[in-house]
Amino acid sequence: MLHSHSPMFSNFPKSSTVWYGLLTAALVTCVFSLPAAGQTQLATAVKLNKKELLGAALQLQNGNVALFVSKPEESNVRVLLLNADGKLRWEKSLTKVQNVFRKVPGAGAATQPNGTPIESLYPTLDPLEVFADGNTIYAAEVVDKNLTRNVKKDNINAHDILLQRLDSTGAKQEQILTYAPISPSTTVSSYLSYVENNTFYQISREVNYRKDTDEFYLNSFSLTGKETQHIRLPLAKPANAKWAPNFKEDWHLVTRYKGVTYLARRYKSDKGSTAEHFVEQRFELLGFDNKGQQVASIQPELQLGAYRTVGKKLHEPAFYIDEANESIVFSGAYQKISKNKQAPNPTTEGFYFERYDLTGRLLSHKQVVYANALSEKHKGLAKQLAETDEVTIIPDNLTRKVAAEVKIADGYVTMYFDPNLKFERSVFITDKEHDKLSEHIWLQYRLASNPKNFSYNAYGSTTPKVGETLPIYYFIESSPLYLTLYDNLLKVPEKEHIRYYVGQATRRSAPVLIDYTKQNHGVINVYTIKQ
């Protein structure tokens, strides 16, 4: 999704009959038959010790799943490897050298002067990154002199990277990668780490406040030889002028896909913008290979009159990789073109949907006008749609269809389109109906080999990215899996859930469901899903 829903949903029906009745009433404006729900079978229940948290979960190439369990302000990370059938295979340990703290409003400064440990706020292992290459697990951590140490290591210096590895048998190796020589006053943070062809790669950000520099680099270290790289990536420095405090420019990791790392930004245009109340926003996506060469570039020229009032809550359009169609999509709301750029409240007309190939060549540009893309019974909602400046785009890889959801004053409008963006139907539910649904309907996370693509592991942001969660609420008719995941929500009280992860099926096994709950100080229930 491009924007997530606030986690405020509770009081869903206890009976599956009432539950599916609510779903049908809320979602269906045309008749379709729901697929038969499958069954979940408990394979393993992992009881956590007091204060232990599930910081991350990975799925390896062979379908095995790795769970990473840690305690705030402690160095030991337990790694539990599950077979593809959900049974525990082995348990090993990794080391987390440092802690990250966040200042939280209302938290007791006397008891926690440094702030709150970040893993107490949401599932993460920051600043430790975990990822997999094939069936080998890696953990990488950049040493930062400004972070609190869990353990003392005399042979590792600021900016160096501690790289740990667990092979398929659980055998552990550890090595220190010496970072390129840079100023001691420069802070280094990792945006993405991965291993390919026996080489460790990292996209890092180097910030020096004294010198007013903010730069991105591709680093690489051969794991079998001595070859290294430290290549500056040509990413423009964010320009955050004081006169536009609500328009924060920054580069964000989109994903790594088929050998290319994609980063994107929103920035203020220097054409026609003024320093008073209005700015024009532009967008850019760049892709880089393992040599730091730019191999993809997109600078959309929408010419849609995309002007925003700086004081309003801005909703950014987004880029995402459409794996089903091997393309890059750029989409968001647009406003009517106005000759008067100082118009106080520009009217939102609809959303645009641009598709590019993986190098950035424009394949198609389409615009959907909200007033046209509504079923007859919902035409009266067109005025409210014109008053909002956000849209949530939800693609479904199974059917290749697209849903577009808009929050309006009275509730939520969802419009459904075929793969060619031909309008099919619209659905409206009130805020009251929406609030009866479980938050976990929207937050069923897909397991992957690199959770750095997951928003929860990226600098405190917890808004899911497109493709990070399964769109089961919107496309329940697409797959028995989606209906099974709905059904599973009835088994544990809403307040007991912390997070769900859904694995991919393999040739030898069914998909697994990781259900991380608060039961008895924390239990991770691992289910296989029979469809």
Image: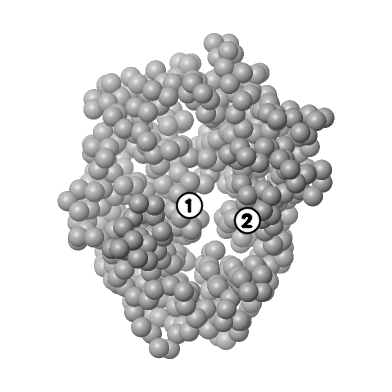
Instruction: Check contact, mark 1 vs mark 2: CB within 8 A.
Output: no
Residue denoted by label 2: 250
* Residue 256 picture location, percent across and down: 57, 58
Q: Is residue 28 above or below residue 11?
A: above
Instruction: State the residue in front, 349 or 362.
Output: 349
Identify the residue at horizontal 39%, vertical 52% (top origin).
Answer: 105
Residue denoted by label 1: 461
Label 2 packing within 10 angstroms: few (<14), some (14-19), many (20+): some
Question: How much space separates mark 1 and mark 2, taking CA atoms?
Answer: 14 Å
The image's colouring method is one colour
Q: Tag 1's secondary structure? A: loop
Identify the residue at horizontal 66%, vertical 18% (top origin).
Answer: 372
Side of 235 where 116 appears, left or right: left
Identify the residue at horizontal 37%, vertical 62% (top origin).
Answer: 115
* Residue 137 picture location, percent across and down: 40, 68
Q: Is residue 76 above or below residue 355?
A: below
Give the total of numbered labels.
2
Q: Residue 374, labelled with which disc?
A: none
Instruction: State the residue in front, 55 or 167.
Output: 55
